Amino acid sequence: MTLVETPAAIAARRTSWWRLLLRDKFACVAVVILLLVAVSAVVGPVLLGDLAVKQNLRAVNRPPFSLDDGWAFALGSDSLGRSVLARLVVASRTTLSVAIPAVLISLVVGSIWGMWAGYHRGRRESVSMRIADVILSFPSLLLAVVVLYVFSPSALNIILVLAIARIPIYLRAARAESAELQSRLFVDAARTFGAKSWAIIARHVAPTVLPTLFTVATLDFCFVMLTESSLSFLGIGIQPPDMSWGLMVAQGRQVLQSAWWIAVFPGLAIVVTTVSATVLASWARLAMDPGQRWRLTLPRSRRKEVKP
Amino acid sequence: MNPVLEVDRLAVDIRTPAGTVRAVREVSFSVRSGETLALLGESGCGKSMTAQAIVGLLDPVAHVAGGEVRLDGTDVLTLPPAQRRRLAGPGLSIVFQDALTALNPIQTVGAQLAEPFRIHERLSRRAARERAVELMERVGIPEPRARAGAYPHQFSGGMRQRLLIALAVALHPKVLLADEPTTALDVTVQAQIMELLRDLRTEQQTALILITHDLAVVAEQADHVAVMYAGGIVETGRVADVFAKPRHPYTRGLLDSVPGEVARGTNLKSIPGSPPDLHAVPSGCAFRTRCPLATDVCAEQRPPLAEAGQGRMSACHHWKELADD
Amino acid sequence: MLTFLRRRITSSAIPLVVVILGVFCLARLTGDPANLYLPLSATPEMRAEFAARHGFDQPLLVQFGDYLAQVVRLDFGESLRTAEPAATAVLRAFPATLQLAGATMILAILGAVVVGSWAAYRPNSVADRVASFTSTTAASMPDFWFAIMGVLVFAVALGWLPTSGTVGAAAWVLPVLTLLIRPFGVLVQVVRGAMVSALSAPYIKVARSKGAGEVRVVFGHALRNAAPPALTVAGDLTVGLVNGAVVVETIFGWPGIGKLMITSILQRDFAVLQAAVLVTAVTIFALNIVIDACYALLDSRVRQGVTA
Ligand SMILES: Nc1ncnc2c1ncn2[C@@H]1O[C@H](COP(=O)(O)OP(=O)(O)OP(=O)(O)O)[C@@H](O)[C@H]1O
Ligand code: SF4
Ligand SMILES: [Mg+2]
């Protein structure tokens, strides 16, 4: 039996997060890419804002990978002679400024609601879960479609629709974990000392549940981003003159035959970002789980061979 | 009469996060038809590994690193997979340690018991089912025809163990390995299961390898015993001889600890210390850190399993000192 | 079995009721319904006449009674565009979507079973790692972009496949592939995970100890045990297929319900949108029941309410 405990002992020597991350090449690359997207979303529009809208009718539909017209046209230009690169960078802000608030809202609302439901059990729990079931059993794009029909498709409305559609995900995860914790001793002890339920949730339940929820959020970020892109692509999301990656693909689609790069690059940006978030989420899932963390200390090739 | 199964210097390695370790080393023993050999040892000494290596069903982390397993003289370890599968059931058969999860939860037990006949005798579904019902009756399942359509979770632990034994003896194996067939069960059921195994062995003239850590079971059921410690065999012989006059300090320690039962995970009363971690098996004799008779030679040379009197073997440099007592 | 079905039907009817209620509320409570039903250019007279004709001047409860009666009779009013009954338009589009979704789901499940089992058979082999990476990418692929890339390569550059239409096998390739990609990616991961744990279960060793060949072990024993979790996810994905159908049908001009919804949104044809949403909701409701029934057939424990 001692043999089986050895890996756990290795994990117990708390390897720092950074060390763990650096050991996983894929996760490292994913983090770098996500940071790059974040940085370009923050500083990009300030630096390139003008370039993204400046029309240059002498440099229309320039193909990519040529520096003849300067670095701004490295990824080509569109039919109005605007730099695809600059537009990509500026659009990253719109894309993130829809996806991140939507994820945050659903994360905060869903997890507080879920912890509350799981902590109190009983009627509060079952009603909450029913509501989650109802929302989840309805295709999110359809929900968005209907709501955006009635209300105008502004960024705020998109954020709200996406947030509501995704709340059940966090609600379910938080409820499951907090219901499990609620029955544990240390929560019981706190309760006997007369601690208020919100205080117990904040002090004891939240710290244990949050890591899981962050993992869920990372994964869900992809989903939200993809849905926003789809909506924008369909013409019921972000509206011109604002830019979003989904919208850029839609615009590029009109000139697909003559200028393929206008549709290709924004799509690539979406793929790279979502794949990175997925890779990071699956790394985080391993890293957050004390029973699994030691696997990350192994070289990749040996990771799955050893049963815990 | 020649032994039906001979295990010769069998070795098993496991890959672990901290490197490859040898879980079973130089294990040799043999059994004859109709006889029972008990493989006795503390938890974690490698009994299950040995059994699974013999039937060729090791976990992916483990692999056979050397030795031979001869069934009627042919080494089964070198057989191609298809031929080896043909032996699984009629040749070598095993009852696994974990009776509660060893049945497929979503198939009826009738279908599971019929499978050996479907595979090896190519019987029709109906004929195989018929045989399965007979088998259930043989191992003492009440109302077998009705219960053949039930699922494993509808059976008690003792009944599930009977079903597993039924599975293992379905094709009258030449050698049956039973890995702690009674540990998960309560005492009265234990006795019934042991009786069933003994009857089946006599009926089918099977060679039975009984894996256990229970000295009482060995004394009651087995003809021969092989005592394992830290992956190796330390002593073999007839049960009566070995139990009367052990010729290895470990065996003697085990026997001294009775009536205090050798429970899982607990240390043996009369032997100080605990079994070694597989990553840090002492040089020379694996038992020397706990052995009252240890000398310098024990640290330098690994004692081979060698003749120690009429029909018995011991892996101890100083077994004669025990024999003299 | 019957009580089981009855229980499931009652519990999954709730979302259906919520959707019917939701559509009603959307139509009546968010301002003047005439805004929803009539084109923006409608004159005040037209609006008044419209309100009187549809009883919008009646009390809400009466309106709701009328509305329910209409829903039951599949009477959603007339399409603004074609002046035919909305239900007719929807029911005409419905089979096209059903065929597309059916073909997609069958292929996705078959493909995922093959690839997922193959990857799980030797965890961490080269095959497994290729399958993992491909499925991760597939699961986070923006389908609209994938479709456009398909068109770019196979229709525009190579000219092998048509860009739209429903006639002939070639016309099905790109729509099905596009709709398939995300469910396939997710399912491969689920099947792989379920198969890895099924293949390491004790009963697999027992099956091998009977002399069962690998085909029998993998498909007869492991897959049947891995099926229930995979089936649950497949069910969720089928619901989500509506999202993809909207995108795919719009891009490939597939005359299905998704395209109908987007067209009716863009042309503000509320009667048709409402009919389409309700028909979709009923289909999803029916689908959930079927999935639950399959689940119960696969696993006797569910049928008997045992939690093992
Ligand atoms: N899957 C595995 N991965 C790593 N080590 C393992 C694995 N299975 C067994 N071991 C190790 O191999 C050694 C031998 O195990 P084995 O199961 O043969 O013991 P045993 O004698 O059958 O014990 P028990 O009486 O508990 O069944 C043990 O030290 C155990 O820790
Ligand atoms: S060889 Fe030496 S250490 Fe080992 S059992 Fe014999 S006396 Fe003890
Ligand atoms: Mg064992």
Image: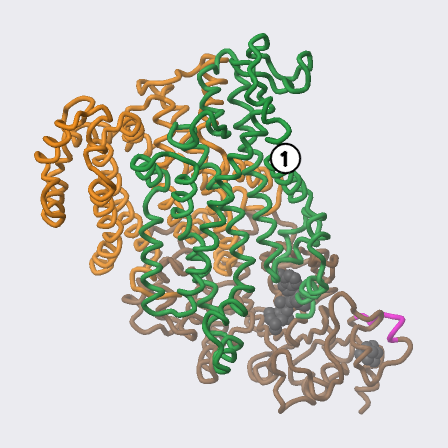
Chain colours: A green, B brown, C orange
Extreme residue toward the front, this view: C44
Q: Is residue B150 magenta?
A: no
> Percent position (x, y) of residue C277?
25, 38
User: Residue B17: x, y in percent?
Assistant: 70, 57
Q: Which image quarter is the N terminus of chain C in? A: bottom left
Q: Check disc 1 and report its element: helix, strand or loop.
A: helix
Q: Is residue C155 left or right of residue B183?
A: left
Q: What residue type is labelled 1?
A: Val
According to the picture, the residue beneath numbered tag 1 turns out to be: A43
Give the quarter of the image for residue A154: top left
> Relative to residue A120, is residue B224 drawn left or right?
right
- Start-end of magenta stretch: B298-304
Residue C28 pos. (x, y %):
20, 42
| Residue drawn 71% across the image and 52% down it | A18
Q: How crowded is mark 1: few (under 14 residues within 10 Å), some or many (20 or more)?
A: some
* Relative depth, front residue between A138 and B250: A138
Q: Nearer the viewer, residue A223 or B245?
A: A223
Q: Is residue B240 visible?
A: yes
Ligand 3 rendered quadrant:
bottom right
- Residue most extreme to the top: A58
Specify whether residue B2 is in view.
no
Q: Quadrant of residue C243?
A: top left
Q: Could you tell me which chain the residue with mark 1 belongs to?
A: A
